[in-house]
Amino acid sequence: MEYISIIILVLTFITLMGIGVPVAWSLGLSSLLTLMVSVAFIPSATTIAQRMGTGLDSFSLLAIPFFVLAGEIMNRGGIANRLIELAKAITGRLPGGLLYVNVIAAMLFGAIAGSAAAAASAIGGILGKRMEKEGYPKELGAAVNVTSSTTGLIIPPSNILIVYSLASGGVSIAALFVAGYVPGIFIGLLLMLTAAIFIKRKNLPGGTKTSVKELTAKFFRAFPSLMLLVVVMGGIVGGVFTATEASAIAVIYTLGLSFFYRELKWKELPAILLKSSETTAIVMLLIATSMSMSWVLSSEDIPQSISSALLSVSDNIWVILLLINLLLLFVGIFMDMTPAVLIFTPIFLPIVTALGVDPVHFGIIMILNLCIGLCTPPVGSVLFIGVGVAQTSIEKVVKPLLPFFVAMIIGLIIITTWPGLTLWLPRLFGL
């Protein structure tokens, strides 16, 4: 029966997505049709509705709307500008320095905002025109912006790490947050190394030298923004407040900071709240329908079938991780990150933990896999945002984008095969 269920689930989901049905509706309808193989329509519909409601009944999920709101406030409150100015002061004088600025600013802004889309939009919007004016190839700038923006999903605070914690059945959010720092920075360094190769080949211009006085001034201008990371992560790691409470504190902090910078007016708040509500509604609907599909998968014993199939190939942990990485890279091309995490975590996590992989380590592996998917068509949301901001086309961006893909995949291989890179910091803090 489970094989029939798998076929129906996959075919209906692919068909619905293929005819343009939104992802959330495709997830919910394919789950309903799969359940109807063994249960009548009314009980099936009732069960799916109940599972959607139950899936959202989690205190941890309250962090998502607050972090989304904090990101929107930051995007409009002058915080991104100050982070970019600091990054320019650090690396802007180097040849091709604006590419390094893009990576560093995306890491800082993405980490604070917790959104790859917000980072791609804000950083690309500010740096794109300046790069073009100084003779940087537009498509190269877009490629750097798209790939570097995803680092903010690994470097905490990150909404998708909260979603993984929910899907995994309770992996510590604090441990996941702390674990994300080293891999996120490592990926950023690989992207900067790749950018350096382009800089040398294309002989890109450098900026003006920054004096110590100017660097100090720009650091202090950005210091209040950087302190948000200290407040949020320090409070979580120190046990002062939970991740959910930290998200609310982040909203208060960013709101106060934006008014302090005098770049946010009271009349702009309704638009910010509306935008945040729209984003939250989309994410929550995806979570609800993904949770209903996860329940259908579980009730039909599909995870056990997939587990048996994988283990029949090999019981070597490195072979299994290679297969899972390939599957997740493929899934990331066609599926958005949130439903992918919610659907595939309950399937793959029991397999790898049984073979000795730490759940925190696997969480970072999974998120990094799906970050690569955000940069690939046809569902790569960050790719479309980056291309749109740069006012170019996907066809033109693909060629300069490929080396950065390779850099991210090399990073994925290293992070997968070197657990200590991810786990040493959480262990240092006793998480």
Image (cartoon, rainbow, N blue to C red):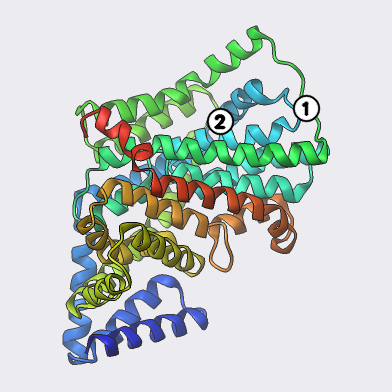
Q: Are marks 2 and 1 in contact (CB under 8 Å)?
A: no
Cα distance in 3D space between marks 2 and 1 = 25 Å
The answer to whether residue 165 is visible is yes
Nearest the camera: 300 or 391? 300
Quadrant of the snapshot with the C terminus = top left
What x and y, as percent, mark residue 128?
71, 42
Rendered image: mark on residue 206 = 1
- Give the residue at x 42% y 31%: 254
- Which one is earlier in the sequence, the residue at label 2 or at label 1? 2
The answer to whether residue 73 is visible is no
Rendered image: mark on residue 78 = 2
Which mark is nearer the camera, 2 or 1? 1
Q: Seen in the image, is 95 located left or right of residue 346?
A: right
Nearest the camera: 306 or 230? 306
Q: Seen in the image, is 267 located left or right of residue 366?
A: right
Question: Pointer 2: residues within 10 angstroms few (<14), some, or many (20+)?
Answer: some
The quarter of the picture where residue 253 lies is top left
- Give the residue at x 22% y 61%: 350
Q: Amino acid at mark 2?
A: Gly
What x and y, as percent, mark residue 108?
50, 33
What x and y, as percent, mark residue 323?
40, 65
Number of marks: 2
Q: Amino acid at mark 1?
A: Gly
Question: Pointer 1: residues within 10 angstroms few (<14), some, or many (20+)?
Answer: some
- Give the residue at x 76% y 29%: 95
Q: Seen in the image, is 53 located left or right of residue 276?
A: left
Quadrant of the snapshot with the N terminus = bottom left
Determine the secondary structure under disc 2: loop
